[in-house]
Image (cartoon, rainbow, N blue to C red):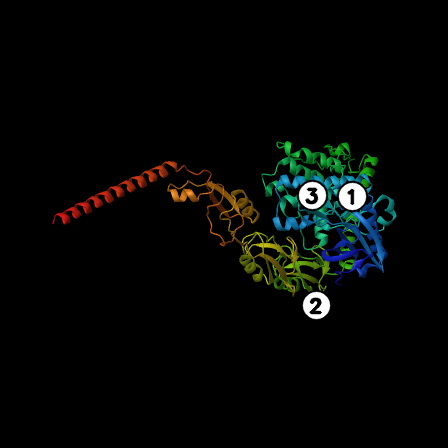
Amino acid sequence: MNQIDKVVAGRYVLTSLIGQGGMADVYKAEDTILKRTVAVKIMRSSLTGDPVYVTRFHREASAVAALSHKNIVEIYDVGDENDEYYIVMEYVPGQALKELIHKRGAVHYVEAVDIMKQVVAATAKAHSMGIIHRDLKPQNIMVTDSGVVKIGDFGIASIQSLSQVTQTDTIMGSLHYLAPEIARGEKATAQSDIYALGIVFYELLRGEVPFNGESPVNIALKHMRVEIPSVKEFNPSIPQSVENIIIKATAKNVNDRYQSANEVLDDLNTCLSRLDEEKLVFDYEDKEEEKTIVAKDEDYFTSDHQLVDKEEDKKLDRKKIMMVAGGVIACIIIIALLVYFMFFSGGNSFEMPDVTGINIDEAVTILQEEYELVVDEDNITYEPSDDQEEGTVLATDPAYQETVKKGDSVSITVSSGQYIVIEDYTGKDYDEVYEILTNLGFTVKKNEITADETKGTIIEQSILEGEKIDPNASDKTITLTVSKGYSATVPNVYGQNITKAQQVLEEAGFTVILEVKDPPTDADSIRSMTTYVVVEQSIEAFTTVYEKGTEITLYYYTTIPDIVEEEEETTNNTTNDNSDTNDNDTTTNDSNSTDGEEEETD
């Protein structure tokens, strides 16, 4: 049932489904009181009436609440509401270690050692508090984007204070990581967790679990009887000291296995400095068994071949009885496992295959035709994804490796497309961004304002950078505030005092350069000169400019040249001209006088 947007305990708003398990669903949520992102695990409604599952659910909260470690998911709150049981825990942004292995395959041994250090440190902390996890596997280990590893899902943990509940449980845990002693029906111990850690380490280095089989019983028998394959044969570059940790952690005999998680951590801290170590080999001879004695018949038998030593005969009989009894017990255990998996887990049971990351059509074909599972159209839901393309499977219910049987119904969550992650568009050209956003299906609204930025530059955006948008949302609208560009009219400062003119232009947003102009040489221009006033500006008045800080050069004079000598020369020229005129007049008069005299003579 879709619970998105549901409010739990009056404060936790469920925002998205981030995980599904056999017992509960996990949602990403917002704590409206403390304003933080959390994860809320809600038990499936079909299990709330089962006291065993309710006890396990509460046990997980009790187990983790007692722990405080940087590599263990922290519990914030626990409760039930309307017969719905929930646990509020730390939200770990990242992915399950299983998903990381699924995507990347084998991890480099240096990185694998670093991951295991964190996992083992957390396990050691749990063991120190008397808590056995019992279900350590990559699906229950989260890896954050920054590389921090955190263990979660203590749902089937064995707690000393709750031992009366633990002892009534059937065999629990994931078969691929199940210690041989648990497969034999023995009680889980810290060394059972260590065995699982060894398998996790192997899977990190190999990219897959060591044992696969057609049936759960087949896998369990391999853990009891078959040695773990060598990771060095798969990748010879892995140091022997690293493989030795796996060999010791997964030893069939608990006496050969690490006695504590702290011992594993010590070896992890030093393994990369012990590269020349020899391969660890265990001697599986029964150390208590007497050595075989080679002797003649007459030393032990009479002539009619009756055994001489009756006590020795009794010892041999006891050994035979013990061997037979051991074989009978082993057969009973195997039969019990067969009965459990065939009847209590359902006939034709098997592990749910992993179809995540592949196309929905292909996934449905695989599930229906190869595994005879049922996938109804009504059980296929779509939601956006951070990294999966449209049409690829994000998750299944039941989840990968959970036990299913033929005819079971499967729900599938499919990617409706990758989230559109909004970028920072400020400072970019509007036309370019408009094309990008419209291609993504956005309706782009333009809000133009006058600003200092270049025309067409985006100044603000209505959806902030980093926000995720459903690509199939019906309304994808974004408003971009865009600069109209800067414009200003050049003031007329001609004839103004140079200092005042500079102030006027700078206040109007211009950059002013002052330059002294060479004075003129002609007298008329000199006579009209004025110092320290604008006589010329590089951009004509009333011109429109479109860039703030445009440079304008103002030209002015600082001195007026001397023109006295030129005035004296002009005066002298005027005097000479007057003298010539008087002489001409005299000559004229003289000429007239002569003419008169001649007239008289006549």
Q: Residues within 10 Å of mark 3 (few under 14, many from 20)?
A: some
Residues 77 and 217: in front is: 77
The answer for how far apart the CA atoms under marks 3 and 2 are is 38 Å
Q: Which residue is mark 3?
A: 148
Instruction: Name the side, left or right, on which 399 lies relative to 315.
Output: left
Amino acid bearing label 3:
Val
Q: Give the secondary structure at mark 3.
A: loop
Q: Residues within 10 Å of mark 2 (few under 14, many from 20)?
A: few
Q: Residues within 10 Å of mark 1 (few under 14, many from 20)?
A: few
Q: Quick one: which residue is furthest to the left in this view?
A: 602
Q: Give the secondary structure at mark 1.
A: helix
Please say whether residue 442 is visible from this viewpoint: no
Q: Earlier in the sequence, mark 3 or mark 1?
A: 3
Amino acid bearing label 2:
Asp
Q: Nearer the viewer, mark 3 or mark 1?
A: 3
Compared to 367, does 195 lie above or below?
A: above
Amino acid bearing label 1:
Met
Q: Residue 520: give x, y in percent of width and height.
A: 40, 42
- What residue sits 82% from the left and 57% below the top? 10
Q: Which residue is mark 2?
A: 378
Q: Which residue is mark 1?
A: 323
Snapshot quadrant of residue 204:
top right
Q: Residue 592: give x, y in percent of width and height.
A: 19, 47
Q: Earlier in the sequence, mark 2 or mark 1?
A: 1
